[in-house]
C-alpha cells in the first residue's frame, strides 16, 4: 500500500478489517464535499446534481450485483444492511412463522440480530460448519420447518475467507418459500457476486470493504419482497429508509462498485498471487503452521494461518512497528478467548491461539509481502 510516509507506517495486511480509499473514489466524491451540497430531494437547481449522482451510484451498485437499481437502497453500512434484512423480514413474516436458520460461523452483525429477535419470540437454529468452515446445504435442509421464514448465511467468512455454497442453499430454501439473505460484505469486489447466480432474496454490502468510505453500505432486496421499514420519515430510498441521503458517501460507494466491476478479474489474480506468496514464505519459515479455512473455496486475498504453540498476540506485538494484521484469539491473564469462527471449526486451542489473519489488497505490493515474510519470520523465531 502506498503511504505518504512509508517509514512511519507498517505494511498493511488487514484489508478484511477495512480498506483504504481508492483515489478514484476520492476524486468522484470531491465535488460533493466542496460545491455540490444540495439536498437530492430538493426540486430546485441545487438538488439536481446530487439527485443525479445518487441515481448513478444506485445503478453502479446494481450493475456490480446484476440487479435492477430499484432493488438497491443505501444504508449506513453492512451492519445496518444486515439488521434491516433480518429484522425486516422477521417482523413482516411473523404471521407465517418465527423460525430463522443461520450458521455458527456468522459475523456478530448477524448473530446478535438473531439473538435480539429471540427476545421477541423468534427461534434461531445454528447449523454447524466443518473443519474447513463450510456449511453443508444438507444440514440446512434438515433444519427447515413449516414455520421457517428466513435463512441467513454469509457469502464469505471475514476471518478465514471460506466461501459458502449459497446457490445450493438457495435451492433448498426456494421450494419452501423461505427467504434467503447473505452477508456479502467480504465477497463484494473480490469475487463475482451476482444475485441471480446466488439465488438470494436479500444481500448486504459494506462500503469500507470495497475501497469506499466507512459509514455507507447497501442492501439488495429482490423485487416483490416487502421487509418492514427500518427507518420512518419522509420516504427517501423508495420508502425503505427515511432520512436525507448521504450523497458524498453514496457517490463513493457507487464509484467503488464501478471500479470493482471493471478490475475484478485482474484484482482476483493479483491478490491471490500475493496471498500465496505470503503463505509460501511463512510456511518455509515455520514448519508447524497450518491453513485455517478451505484451501480452494476461499477469498483470493485472505490467509488465516495457525502457528502451533505460538501466541498470536505476542507475535503481532513484535511485528506491530512494521506489519499490521489481526489475531484469531485474545489472550488474557487467566484464559484465551478464541474467536467464535475458529471455535465453530473446532480448531484445537494450541493452534487457535497462534492464529493470525493476513488479508492483502489491490494496493499491496510484492515488495511489501517479501518484507512482511522477513519480519514475521524473525518474530516467530
Image (spheres, rainbow, N blue to C red):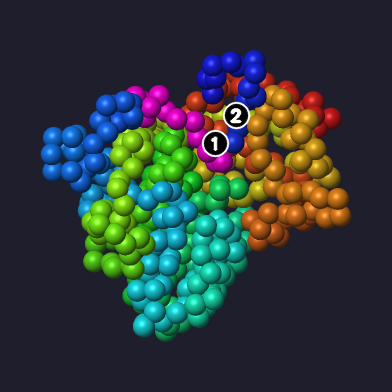
311 sits left or right of 259 in the view: right
Which quarter of the rendering shows the N terminus? top right
Residue 315 against residue 243 in the figure, above or below: above
Tell me, yes or no, whether the two marked residues, 1 and 2, touch with CB atoms within 8 Å: yes
The answer to whether residue 280 is magenta is no
Residue 260 place in picture, x, y as percent: 37, 35
Residue 88: quadrant of the picture? bottom left
- Dominant SS of magenta comes to loop
Residue at screen point 49% across, 77% down: 120
Instruction: Give the magenta range.
Output: 15-27
307 sits left or right of 326 in the view: right
* Residue 305 is at least partly visible in this image: no
The front one of 288 and 187 is 187
The front one of 62 and 308 is 62
Residue 232: quadrant of the picture? bottom left
Secondary element under disc 1, as helix, strand or loop, is: loop
Secondary element under disc 2, as helix, strand or loop, is: strand
Residue at screen point 86% across, 50% down: 333
Residue 320 place in picture, x, y as percent: 72, 29
Which quarter of the rendering shows the C terminus? top right
The front one of 364 and 139 is 364
Residue 177 place in picture, x, y as percent: 34, 75
* Residue 338 is at least partly visible in this image: yes
Q: Neighbour class for label 1 at 10 Å: few (<14), some, many (≥20)?
A: many
Residue at screen point 36% across, 62% down: 230
Q: Which residue is outermost to the right?
A: 334
Instruction: Please name the residue that numbered disc 1 is placed on.
Output: 15
Instruction: Please name the residue that numbered disc 2 is placed on.
Output: 12
Residue 229: quadrant of the picture? bottom left
Residue at screen point 56% across, 48% down: 158
Residue 128 against residue 283 in the figure, above or below: below
220 sits left or right of 354 in the view: left
Amino acid at each position: 500500500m502506498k503511504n505518504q510516509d512509508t517509514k512511519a507506517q507498517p505494511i498493511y495486511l488487514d484489508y478484511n478489517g477495512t480498506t483504504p480509499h481508492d483515489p478514484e473514489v476520492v476524486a468522484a466524491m470531491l465535488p460533493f464535499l466542496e460545491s455540490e451540497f444540495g439536498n437530492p430531494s430538493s426540486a430546485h437547481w441545487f438538488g439536481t446534481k446530487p439527485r443525479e449522482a445518487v441515481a448513478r451510484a444506485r445503478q453502479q451498485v446494481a450493475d456490480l450485483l446484476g440487479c435492477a437499481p430499484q432493488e438497491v437502497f443505501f444504508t449506513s453500512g453492512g451492519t445496518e444492511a444486515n439488521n434491516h434484512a433480518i429484522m425486516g423480514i422477521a417482523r413482516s413474516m411473523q404471521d407465517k412463522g418465527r423460525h430463522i436458520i443461520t450458521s455458527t460461523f456468522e459475523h456478530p452483525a448477524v448473530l446478535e440480530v438473531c439473538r435480539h429477535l429471540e427476545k421477541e419470540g423468534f427461534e434461531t437454529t445454528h447449523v454447524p460448519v466443518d473443519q474447513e468452515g463450510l456449511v453443508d446445504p444438507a444440514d440446512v435442509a434438515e433444519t427447515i420447518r413449516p414455520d421457517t421464514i428466513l435463512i441467513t448465511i454469509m457469502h464469505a467468512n471475514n476471518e478465514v475467507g471460506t466461501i459458502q455454497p449459497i446457490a445450493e442453499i438457495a435451492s433448498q430454501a426456494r421450494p419452501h418459500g423461505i427467504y434467503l439473505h447473505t452477508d456479502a460484505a467480504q465477497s463484494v469486489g473480490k469475487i463475482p457476486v451476482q444475485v441471480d447466480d446466488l439465488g438470494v432474496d436479500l444481500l448486504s454490502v459494506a462500503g469500507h470493504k470495497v475501497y469506499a468510505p466507512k459509514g455507507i453500505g447497501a442492501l439488495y432486496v429482490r423485487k416483490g419482497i416487502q421487509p418492514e421499514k427500518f427507518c420512518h420519515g419522509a420516504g427517501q430510498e423508495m420508502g425503505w429508509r427515511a432520512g436525507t441521503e448521504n450523497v458524498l458517501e453514496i457517490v463513493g460507494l457507487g464509484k467503488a462498485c464501478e471500479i470493482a466491476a471493471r478490475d475484478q478479474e485482474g484484482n482476483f489474480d493479483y491478490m491471490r498471487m500475493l496471498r500465496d506468496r505470503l503463505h509460501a514464505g511463512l510456511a518455509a519459515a515455520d514448519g508447524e503452521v497450518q491453513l485455517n479455512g478451505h484451501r480452494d473455496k476461499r477469498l483470493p486475498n485472505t490467509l488465516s494461518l495457525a502457528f502451533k504453540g505460538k501466541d498470536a498476540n505476542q507475535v503481532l506485538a513484535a511485528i506491530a512497528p512494521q506489519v499490521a494484521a489481526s489475531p484469531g484469539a485474545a489472550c488474557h491473564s487467566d484464559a484465551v478467548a478464541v474467536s467464535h469462527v475458529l471455535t465453530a471449526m473446532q480448531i484445537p486451542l494450541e493452534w487457535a491461539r497462534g492464529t493470525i489473519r493476513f488479508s492483502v489488497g489491490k494496493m499491496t505490493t510484492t515488495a511489501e509481502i517479501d518484507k512482511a515474510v522477513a519480519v514475521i519470520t524473525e518474530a516467530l523465531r
